Amino acid sequence: MAGEALVLIVEDEPAQREVLAYNIRAEGFAVATAAAGDEALIAVRETPPDVIVLDWMLPNVSGIEVCRQLKMGADTAKIPIIMLSARSEENDKIRGLETGADDYITKPYSVAELLARLRTQLRRVRPATVGERLEYEDIIIDLGEHRVYRGGDELSLGPTEYRLLSAFMERPGRVWSREQLLDRVWGRDIYVDSRTVDVHIGRLRKALRVAEGADPIRTVRGAGYSLG
Ligand code: CA
């Protein structure tokens, strides 16, 4: 579903891969999988994930090498990587982190532990996907309960307007092009006319117009929209 964080799981053991995919999906995240290092590099290029769970020992290209290449790539360096490893030696952990991994977990690990680390990484890159509150001036989104308030009043928003507002409130001040909003709110695989964005921005503005609240959404001519 659009708007969810996408987690890429790179693990060659089918059983482990399935357990991870199942549990991560159950947390409300979208999941992509790869079973080898080269496959992972292709998957990242085709559909950049929000975070990668990367096994160290992989066929074709090792996890360490995948991590090194992604951290050197201009477009991929910022994607958080959590390395999984059966190796417990401190040297390996240091090597993993030196390669640029953002976190490192030793097997066997608990799924709860991995999910906690995953949330920590997602909180940095996609705060609205980990079930918290977003606040901007007098507007509050309760992400856990999917409720929106302005000046204490609960607002009624359609699902698309809700996702639009969440995107804006994750990064106040950021200017979003219509294409970026389409990718983010409607999803990468769906064809929607960019004028549809304007229609839903109009609905969102209307929904936010309560009492004397000013219109918080700014139209940036020739560029798109931003919050504030
Ligand atoms: Ca492995």
Image (cartoon, rainbow, N blue to C red):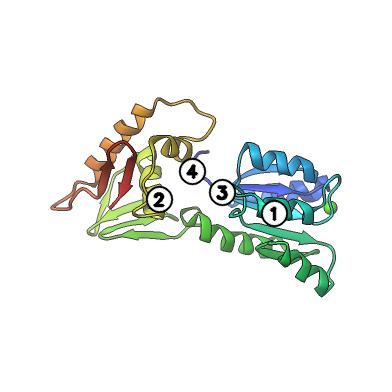
In the visual, does 144 lie left or right of 6? left
Q: Position of residue 55 (x, y in %)?
A: 78, 54
Q: Which residue is mark 3?
A: 28
For marks 3 and 1, the one nearer the N-term is 3
Mark 4 highlights which residue?
Answer: 3
> Residue at label 1?
53
Percent coordinates x, y for residue 145 in the rendering: 42, 54
Q: Which mark is residue 157?
A: none
Q: In terms of depth relative to the viewer, which is nearer, 81 or 71?
A: 71
Q: Residues within 10 Å of mark 2 (few under 14, many from 20)?
A: some
Foreground: 46 or 199?
Answer: 46
The secondary element bearing badge 4 is classed as loop
The residue drawn where x is 27% and y is 46% is 217
Amino acid under disc 3: Gly
Nearer the N terminus, badge 4 or badge 2?
A: 4
For the residue with label 4, is its CB less than 8 Å from the closest atom of ligand 1?
no
Give the amino acid at mark 1.
Answer: Val
Query: Residue at left 42%, top 39%?
Result: 181
Q: Earlier in the sequence, mark 2 or mark 1?
A: 1
Provide residue 161's location: percent of width, then percent of height. Answer: 35, 40
- The residue positioned 81% from the left and 68% from the top of the image is 92
